[in-house]
Image (tube, rainbow, N blue to C red):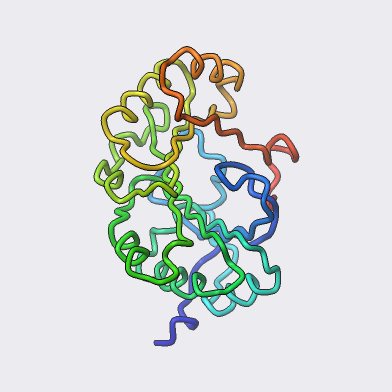
């Protein structure tokens, strides 16, 4: 089958500026695939998974055409959980990565999908240097802590990011424990849970602990637009 004829369910595809992480502020094409294997208590995109239906079905070729029309150098592949589709998601990445104007394809993944097949491909592909994982490691308040695949840390490189969404002091300490025991490579991001932790409190905790390689991560799109607004 021609990879460009593979069909994927989408929630939305749009362009905006990246709101968080190492590429925050850059014009970015967002490709939000449908559905998720987790149900985090604080999820801010509940419209992206069942029982809500996908909003459109697009072929890989149709997605490529939209990406080319906007011409942004950065892509965020997100969800839901975009790697849920495994071979189909990999086919999409294999078609996107060779586009000459693209510099960065970052994949927002939830820590409960095995990254090894995707890591193996990016390590063997001449365009694999464009692919980055942003792994959102779930802590206690998410309700999904037991679904995390610890071996995923072995497949991260210095260009990847590990995000911890933190709701209280106990989770801050929990995140530090995971960092100490499991993180070997990748930029560490501590993000305050939007509804429960003021950012200044998280900053004070960061400054009180000895590590200086942890970056505060804010969802700047929620400051620019209404936090519930879609497509931004």
Count of numbered tags? 0
Q: Residue at x 32, y 55 (%)?
A: 115
Q: Residue at x 54, y 62 (%)?
A: 54
Judge left or right: residue 188 versus residue 76: left
Q: Residue at x 30, y 44 (%)?
A: 153
Residue 204, above or below 55: above
Is residue 16 shown to the viewer in this render? yes
> Viewer-proximal residue, 147 or 17?
17
Q: Residue at x 59, y 26 (%)?
A: 195
Judge left or right: residue 147 versus residue 102: left
Residue 81, above or below 153: below
> Viewer-proximal residue, 156 or 114?
156
Percent of width and height locating residue 159: 44, 49
Percent of width and height locating residue 164: 44, 33
Give the image quarter of residue 213.
top left
Judge left or right: residue 88 versus residue 228: left
In the picture, which quadrant includes the N terminus?
A: bottom left
Percent of width and height locating residue 188: 44, 35
Percent of width and height locating residue 11: 58, 59
Is residue 51 shown to the viewer in this render? no
Judge left or right: residue 81 versus residue 87: right
Q: Residue furthest bottom?
A: 1
């Amino acid at each position: 089958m021609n990879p460009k004829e593979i069909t994927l369910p989408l929630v939305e595809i749009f362009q905006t500026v990246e709101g968080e992480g190492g590429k925050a502020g850059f014009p970015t094409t967002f490709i939000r695939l449908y559905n998720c294997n987790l149900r985090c208590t604080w999820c801010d995109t509940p419209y992206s998974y069942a029982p809500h239906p996908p909003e459109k079905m697009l072929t890989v070729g149709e997605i490529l055409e939209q990406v080319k029309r906007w011409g942004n150098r950065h892509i965020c592949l997100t969800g839901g959980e975009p790697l849920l589709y495994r071979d189909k998601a990999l086919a999409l990445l294999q078609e996107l990565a060779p586009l000459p104007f693209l510099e960065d394809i970052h994949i927002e993944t939830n820590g409960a999908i095995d990254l090894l097949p995707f890591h193996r491909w990016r390590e063997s592909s001449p365009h694999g240097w464009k692919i980055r994982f942003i792994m959102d490691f779930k802590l206690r308040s998410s309700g999904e802590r037991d679904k995390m695949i610890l071996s995923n840390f072995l497949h991260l490189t210095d260009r990847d990011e590990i995000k911890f969404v933190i709701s209280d002091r106990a989770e801050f300490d929990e995140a530090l424990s995971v960092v100490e025991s499991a993180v070997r490579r990748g930029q560490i991001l501590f993000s305050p849970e939007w509804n429960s932790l003021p950012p200044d409190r998280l900053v004070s905790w960061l400054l009180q602990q000895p590590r200086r390689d942890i970056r505060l991560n804010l969802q700047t799109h929620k400051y620019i637009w209404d936090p519930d607004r879609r497509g931004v």
